[in-house]
Amino acid sequence: FYKKYISPPTQDLQPKMETTSVKGLGISGKDGIDSLKEFTIPLPEIKSNDLLVQIKGNALNPVDYKITEGVFNNASEEKPMIIGYDGSGVVVKVGDGVKDFKVGDEVYYSASSPALPGNCADF
């Protein structure tokens, strides 16, 4: 599954911010894991306590499969949902309230809510 849908991480870990959009893997309904497709969405705006991370590695876990089947899923054709809970990458932007991270830091994380954009994406 991983090789079919998700590109392996690159070795280049330099932050890049030339983009205003994000390419990601996600869903636009509740049709299950076989309905995954690629989307391009606007680059998310970060809030005061947020980080914007250029994704270098990610994984799918059981909550992602449940999301594709409709749990915590408000996805639609007009508003697709990027999946992915666990990821790693390089910080490219920090919110005003962030104290412990800076641009260029390598990080790994698990998302705190399925309502947030997933990490099967560029950012």
Image (cartoon, rainbow, N blue to C red):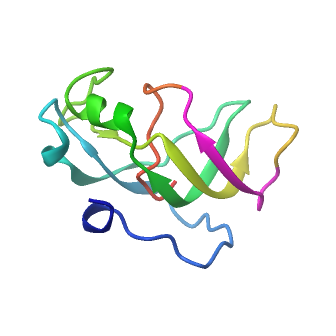
Residue that sits furthest to the front in the current view: 62
**What residue range appears in magenta?**
102-112
Residue that sits furthest to the right in the current view: 99
Q: Out of 67 and 95, give the one closest to the viewer.
A: 67
Position of residue 54 measured from the top left corner of the image (x, y, whole percent): 58, 58
**Quarter occupied by residue 78:** top left
Position of residue 70 measured from the top left corner of the image (x, y, whole percent): 22, 24
- 37 vs 102, left or right, is left
Placement of the N terminus among the 4 image quadrants: bottom left
Residue depicted at 28% across the width and 24% down the height:
73
Is residue 37 visible in the rendered image? The answer is yes
Is residue 79 visible in the rendered image? The answer is no
Q: Out of 11 and 44, give the one closest to the viewer.
A: 11
Q: Out of 37 and 4, give the one closest to the viewer.
A: 4
- 109 vs 31, left or right, is right
Q: In the rendered image of this protein, does residue 36 appear above or below residue 105?
A: above
- 28 vs 61, left or right, is left
Position of residue 18 measured from the top left corner of the image (x, y, whole percent): 57, 67
Residue that sits furthest to the bottom in the current view: 11
Q: Total of numbered circles in the picture?
A: 0
**Quarter occupied by residue 115:** top left
**Quarter occupied by residue 55:** bottom right
Residue depicted at 35% across the width and 63% down the height:
6
Residue depicted at 43% across the width and 27% down the height:
114
Check if residue 27 falls in the magenta segment: no
